[in-house]
């Protein structure tokens, strides 16, 4: 009876690894050899070495390897004369590539899933030997590790991280205390109907690629920036004993940090940017803020701040002015509310917009005109 040829794989020397060609050879051996655990380790070792030698990611090396797989033998059962025989049959190159890729992907998934609990246990400070597994055959699962970690007291945070957070809280506290002590705040709020803005946003995003779609928060930022052209007194900074108006509109956006605290870097010239540009720059700003990569000018240039706590479920937020600015605008979450429209009571999506402003610079009349301008601009989202 014909039998499948046994090919004994051997671990390649590092100097002999020159990239995807060797990996492709090992894939062929792996498909011929019955000792898959040995073949698997060899392939993964070769991938790591090839990646290091070529400077390419392992996935790219693997893709090159699969493209280079040559026809191999596959043992199939054939019925001849009433009996079954194991017959070696050559596999076409396309099927060989498919088999190789499927085998590698499945084993990569298995390796990753097996390694997850151990890695998670190390991160959470859990000893796997003390955990009772509930998986197949008593295997320890991710849920087992998380459950064991939940029963332990949370590990103490590093002193360096606590010091950083303490310093940030002190800085924020000092600035807010100074603001409330020196700036005579006044507060205004209004409810804005977001029906047209949300309908326009849905239609607009339907025409955009997924990566370029807009968040409704960008509409709010652009509306604030354009409204400042109509009430420019709110766009400036207090220096000494007077306000210094700013011709440029640099809107600071409040961004919460994962470790605690908040920063409000500037979206420069927000009134002149398109909604698409604002969206891209806003995403970039958030990523760099949370990675600690902000430029000093982005932190010092804002001429007004916008804060929104809608994602946290807050309906109304009255901000504290960040010195030396003279105003801050707040937005809550969008909620369905009864709304009087043309003599009828209808349900509409409303957002509460607030203004905290410096009474040394403006008064309630000018502040009211500003909020009215924001409302009017959001009723014509296509012109933002």
Image (cartoon, helix red, strand yellow):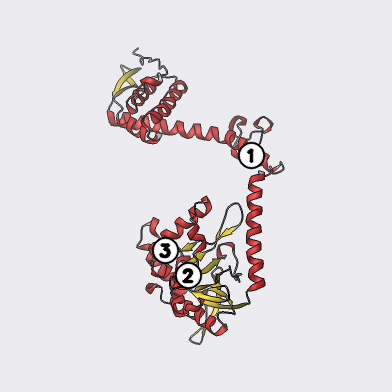
Relative to the observer, which residue lies in front, 284 or 361? 361
Q: Residue at x 39, y 55 (%)?
A: 211
Q: Residue 170: which quarter of the image? A: bottom right
Relative to the observer, which residue lies in front, 264 or 189? 264
For the residues labelled 1 and 3, the Cα–Cα distance comes to 39 Å
Marks 3 and 2, the one that precedes in the sequence:
2
Per the image, the residue denoted by label 2 is 220
Residue 83 visible, this angle: no
Numbered circle sitting on residue 278? 3
Marks 1 and 3, the one that precedes in the sequence:
1
Q: Residue at x 63, y 47 (%)?
A: 161
Relative to the observer, which residue lies in front, 272 or 376? 272
384 with respect to 374 (left or right) = left
Marks 2 and 1, the one that precedes in the sequence:
1
31 with respect to 235 (left or right) = left
Q: Is residue 235 depicted above or below 121 in this figure?
A: below
Residue 95 visible, this angle: yes
Q: Residue at x 36, y 31 (%)?
A: 54
56 with respect to 166 (left or right) = left
**Front position among marks 3 and 2:** 3
Q: Is residue 213 depicted above or below 4 in this figure?
A: below
Q: Residues within 10 Å of mark 3 (few under 14, many from 20)?
A: many
Q: Residues within 10 Å of mark 1 (few under 14, many from 20)?
A: some
Q: Position of residue 277 (x, y in %)?
A: 39, 62
Q: Position of residue 7 (x, y in %)?
A: 38, 15
Q: Residue at x 65, y 37 (%)?
A: 125
**Front position among marks 1 and 3:** 3
Q: What secondary structure is marked by label 1?
A: helix
Q: What secondary structure is marked by label 2?
A: helix
For the residues labelled 3 and 2, the Cα–Cα distance comes to 11 Å
For the residues labelled 2 and 1, the Cα–Cα distance comes to 40 Å
């Amino acid at each position: 009876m014909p039998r499948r040829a046994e090919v004994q794989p051997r671990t390649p020397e590092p100097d002999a690894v020159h990239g995807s060609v060797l990996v492709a050879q090992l894939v062929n051996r792996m498909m011929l050899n019955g000792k898959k655990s040995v073949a698997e380790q060899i392939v993964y070792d070769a991938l790591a070495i090839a990646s290091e030698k070529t400077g390419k990611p392992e996935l790219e090396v693997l893709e090159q390897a699969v493209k280079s797989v040559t026809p191999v033998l596959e043992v199939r059962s054939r019925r001849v004369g009433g009996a079954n025989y194991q017959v070696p049959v050559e596999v076409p190159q396309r099927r060989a590539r498919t088999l190789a890729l499927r085998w590698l992907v499945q084993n990569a998934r298995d390796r990753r899933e097996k390694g997850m609990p151990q890695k998670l246990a190390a991160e959470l400070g859990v000893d796997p030997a003390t955990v009772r597994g509930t998986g197949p055959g008593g295997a320890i699962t991710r849920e087992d590790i998380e459950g064991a970690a939940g029963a332990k007291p949370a590990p103490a945070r590093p002193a360096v991280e606590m010091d950083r957070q303490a310093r940030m809280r002190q800085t924020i506290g000092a600035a807010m205390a100074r603001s409330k002590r020196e700036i005579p705040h006044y507060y205004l709020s209004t409810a804005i109907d977001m029906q047209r803005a949300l309908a326009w946003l849905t239609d607009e995003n339907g025409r955009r690629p997924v990566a370029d779609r807009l968040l409704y928060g960008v509409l709010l930022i652009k509306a604030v920036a354009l409204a400042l052209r109509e009430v420019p007194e709110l766009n400036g900074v207090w220096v000494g004993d007077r306000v210094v108006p700013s011709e440029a509109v640099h809107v600071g956006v409040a961004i919460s940090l994962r470790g605690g605290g908040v920063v409000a870097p500037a979206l420069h010239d927000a009134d002149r940017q398109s909604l698409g540009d604002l969206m891209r720059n806003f995403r970039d700003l958030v990523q760099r803020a949370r990675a600690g990569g902000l430029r000093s000018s982005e932190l010092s240039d804002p001429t007004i701040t916008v804060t929104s706590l809608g994602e946290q479920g807050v309906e109304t937020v009255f901000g504290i002015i960040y010195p030396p600015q003279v105003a801050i605008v707040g937005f809550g979450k969008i909620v369905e509310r009864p709304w009087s429209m043309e003599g009828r009571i209808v349900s509409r999506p409303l957002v509460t917009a607030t203004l905290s402003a410096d009474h040394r610079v403006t008064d309630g009349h000018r502040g009211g005109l500003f909020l009215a301008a924001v409302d009017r601009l959001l009723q014509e989202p296509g012109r933002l």
